[in-house]
Image (cartoon, helix red, strand yellow):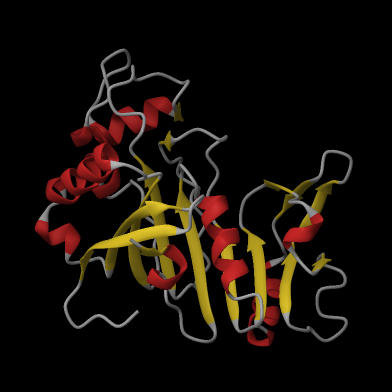
Amino acid sequence: MSRLTDIFQFSKREVVTIVGSGGKTSLMWLLAEAHRESKVFVTTTTKIRRPAPWMYEEFRNNEDLLRRPFGPGITLAADEIDINEGKLGILLPEVFEAALPHFDYTFIEGDGSRNLPLKGWAKQEPVVPQSTTCTIGVITLWPLGRKINEKIIHRLPLFCQISGCHPGDPLILEDIAAAIMHPLGLLKAARGRKILYINQVENSLSQNQARSLLAALRPDFLQGLSLVAAGSVQRNEGHILWQKKGQLL
């Protein structure tokens, strides 16, 4: 396996929005850390918990984001919606857009899943800014075989609607593939290059499952992607399952 951060290669001024479930927050911070010697902008279009202070050099909110120059390192910027609980929210659109030219790389969390491994998407989500140049859809396969219920799926009725599955049945690979490919599924709001990343692939069983998922994707859907990768954010390991011919990352 390669280092996962070597698989995701981005150009300067790249704006990357990460959606889905099963490790998107961890992936965002892994990618931000990999570019920490540059000027890195981390923000959200949903609600997130404020991370540990060591994960970024500086925090700024709507009021002070543009008041002074940015140095190298990670700048976390968001609206402080609940200081006591450490909850962060969305920057004003005009503030966000004005900040982009000041950074080398921008990483955005564009989806929420209540810490569950799978989800269905409401009409208003995910939120992918128009300036996004690359969208990464994150999915995990460890729930395969488990009973379909609200313990593993956020917005269960919506997931069942797009996947065709039924509550109480065991989750199968085709359910996840359908949720990925559906027009109202994982990449419904994607902009720019589209990448599918399968997380928590850490042994031969999960590697085989990832290859089976790739085989279950329709050719026309696959051709709309730039890359399909699998790996482990926790270990910073991964490999490319499929890459579009002639596609430069």
Up-down: is 53 above or below 86?
below
* Residue 119 picture location, percent across and down: 43, 36
Up-down: is 127 above or below 97?
above
Up-down: is 149 above or below 31?
above
The quarter of the picture where the N terminus appears is: bottom left
Q: Nearer the viewer, residue 131 or 94?
A: 131
Image quarter for residue 30?
bottom right
Q: Is residue 100 left or right of residue 1?
A: right
Residue at horizontal 28%, vertical 36%?
162
Residue 101 in sight:
yes
Residue 187 in sight:
no
Residue at horizontal 83%, vertical 38%?
85
Image quarter for residue 2?
bottom left
Residue at horizontal 30%, vertical 31%?
161
Q: Nearer the viewer, residue 148 or 56?
A: 56
Q: Is residue 221 left or right of residue 90?
A: left
The quarter of the picture where the C terminus appears is: bottom left
Q: Nearer the viewer, residue 141 or 90?
A: 141
* Residue 229 picture location, percent across and down: 31, 59
Number of numbered tags placed on the structure image = 0
* Residue 242 picture location, percent across and down: 20, 64
Q: Nearer the viewer, residue 2 or 46?
A: 2
Residue at horizontal 47%, vertical 20%?
151
* Residue 24 picture location, percent across and down: 50, 51
Q: Is residue 32 left or right of residue 208?
A: right
